[in-house]
Image (spheres, helix red, strand yellow):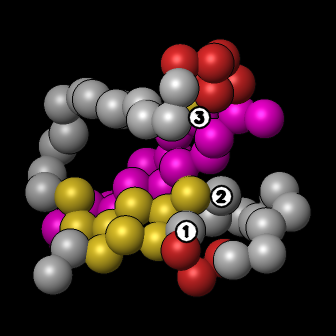
Amino acid sequence: MPVELRLTYAGGATENARLPVEIWFQGGRYAYVRKVPAEVVKVEVDPDQHFPDVRRENNVWTKR
């Protein structure tokens, strides 16, 4: 399954990204690198909850 991401920037703007299913064939880690318009303060995996997941609490990273 592809990976759906939602990036939240400082100031509140958001952007969605979709990573292709092929990333799963590259091993246990994948780096999504890109230029961003502002500081990223939050990243959510599957923000619209389209995929089954028994631990949704680990789908969000928030900058401290």
Q: Position of residue 55 (x, y in %)?
A: 69, 77
Q: Position of residue 18 (x, y in %)?
A: 59, 34
Residue 2 inside the magenta-drawn segment: yes
Residue type at mark 3?
Arg
Circle 2/circle 1 CB separation < 8 Å: yes
The residue pinned by badge 2 equals: 46
Look at 34% across and 32% down and name the residue there.
31
Look at 14% across and 52% down and name the residue there.
38
Q: Which mark is residue 18?
A: 3
Query: Circle 2 — which element?
Result: loop
Give the crowd class for mark 1: few <14, some 14-19, many >=20 residues within 10 Å. Answer: few
Quadrant, the N terminus? top right
Residue type at mark 1?
Asn
Using the rendered image of the protein, determine whether residue 12 is visible from the camera's viewpoint: no
Quadrant of residue 49 within the rendered picture: bottom right
Badge nearest the viewer, 3 or 1:
1
Give the crowd class for mark 3: few <14, some 14-19, many >=20 residues within 10 Å. Answer: few
Q: CA distance from mark 3 to mark 2?
A: 10 Å
Q: CA distance from mark 3 to mark 1?
A: 15 Å
Q: Position of residue 33 (x, y in %)?
A: 27, 29
Residue type at mark 2?
Asp
The residue pinned by badge 1 equals: 59
Give the crowd class for mark 2: few <14, some 14-19, many >=20 residues within 10 Å. Answer: many
Q: Which residues are magenta?
A: 1-18
| 4 vs 56, nearest the viewer | 56
| 36 vs 30, nearest the viewer | 30
Mark 2 or mark 3, which is nearer the start of the sequence? Answer: 3
- Compared with residue 7, is residue 18 higher up or lower down, i.e. above or below? above
